[in-house]
Image (cartoon, rainbow, N blue to C red):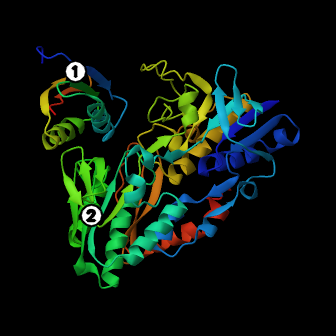
Amino acid sequence: MADVTISRTIDARGSFCPGPLMELIRAIREAVAGDVIAVWSADKGSKIDIPKWVEKAGHTLVGIESKNGYDEIVVQKTH
Amino acid sequence: MQRIVILGGGVGGTLTANLLARKLRRRIDRGEVRVTVVDATGQHVYQPGFMYIAMGGERAANLARPEKSLLDRRVDLVVDRIARIDRDASVVELASGEKLDYDQLVVATGSRIVPEAIEHFEQEAHHFYTAEAAAKLRKALDAFTGGRVVIGIAGMPYKCPPAPLEVAFLVEAELRERGLRDKAELHFCSPIGRAFTIESVSEMATPILEEKGIELHTFFNVDAIDPGKKQVLSLEGEELSYDLLILVPPHRGAQVLIDSGLAPAPGGWLPTDRGTLQVKTGPDRPDADPTPRYPNIYALGDATDLPLSKAGSTAHFEAPVVAQRIAAVVEGRQPTGKGSIYMGKVMCFFEVGDGKGTLLQFDYDHPPKPPKPNQLWHLGKIVFNKTYWHTVPKGRV
């Protein structure tokens, strides 16, 4: 994920499913096509739910990286 | 004089006030403590009843009582709107210009619906989050003779999470009873990847949706309504035609909390400590510091940002914690013991139609294990609704 520039990072670590997904959806609504959004989530469900949503909504999953106690899920808004 | 000010006369505010009046009655009688509830209307409304205006012959007149009639006589009631909370000076400014100084503040300002956040919502979509809207939905159901019914959720979080599923089940049962089921298509739209946020409840509800022939659309986040084509469009690119559209409107916290710098925009939900229910951090300090920023400000009910149901039940189980903690502070003690920490307890009834219901009971660490739907839990909900006025606000259950 080193070659993408993250436009916005959402720290949803205090939030539980579906909070991180809802935070991402809100950010996607506010973003413009091409923006890259990183979501930090400590909820294990996020790395399953968020990629499924990204696929359905037709955006791009840039990657998922496990950090210290949370996951960073990076999504690019494509339309 | 210790001044305890409680903002909001809903379940959380009323119950906290009455529990404090009970715990601190001698001090209140001696004039050492004053408990004041501020409410914009002075009417206590039993909001879970709205759904039954649409689906169960309930009347709006049965769902409101004067707040004063529910409060302990030791509690003062001020009927006014809140203009501003000055957290540095510990003052609540009211619309009338009156100022209330506080030593302990309880924010129980609830949530509000914002249908205007979605264009054409008000003319096209029905809902059941006010008595008027529920009555209008009832009329629309009476006039319905067949077609596509779309039921969905136009924003999260929202009050009473099971309600849209309950409405889907109840509408389906009603159409069957009226001999209209084969002339109707029912669609249920969920913003997330399953029918309900909590997995175990989703696992219970999904087969019922299938059995009743209600089509489930997951990841359907309402983006727009096209009144010309009679279509609801999702952010994910799905389009659903409707003849009758029933949507949970978007919800937000009280605007005054955003304006006073206590809660972040646009949601307006108060950052709240999950155990002590103290207001944690303001948007001006969005860090992960666990120290309560405002140790003398508590939040409960819909007003918080806690990952729990926005429901009277949540407020019902939070109020004893807030009351216990404040009483301890007033009495110069450290709040201790099990009852001084909120464990996330919530309990709600869940209608599945055909006179059956189930019960959702859970906390932060234990997801619900809903029993198989039966008539008992449906009757439990009816009895609870009817006896509410004598039980919950007065702290009798």
Q: B278 or B269: which is nearer to us?
A: B269
Residue name at image x 18 percent, y 46 percent = B237
Q: B199 or B62: which is nearer to us?
A: B62
The chain holding disc 2 is B
| Residue, disc 2 | B242
Q: Is residue B135 above or below residue B287?
A: below
**Crowd tier of the residue under label 2, counting other residues whose Cα lies within 10 Å: few below 14, some 14–19, many 20 or above:** many
Residue A67's disc number = 1
Give the structural element (helix, strand or loop) at label 1: loop
Q: Quadrant of residue B4?
A: top right
**Crowd tier of the residue under label 1, counting other residues whose Cα lies within 10 Å: few below 14, some 14–19, many 20 or above:** few
Give the structural element (helix, strand or loop) at label 2: loop
Residue name at image x 46 percent, y 30 percent = B265
Q: Quadrant of residue B6?
A: top right
**Residue B127: percent from the left, percent from the top?**
43, 60
Q: Quadrant of the N terminus of chain B?
A: top right
Residue name at image x 20 percent, y 44 percent = B236
Residue name at image x 41 percent, y 60 percent = B163
Give the spatial CA distance, label 2 vs label 1.
Answer: 45 Å
What type is the residue that disc 1 sits on? Lys
Q: Quadrant of the C terminus of chain B?
A: bottom right
Q: B333 or B316: which is nearer to us?
A: B316
Q: Seen in the image, is B221 located left or right of residue B320?
A: left
The chain holding disc 1 is A
Q: Seen in the image, is B13 located left or right of residue B274?
A: right
**Residue B90: percent from the left, percent from the top?**
69, 24
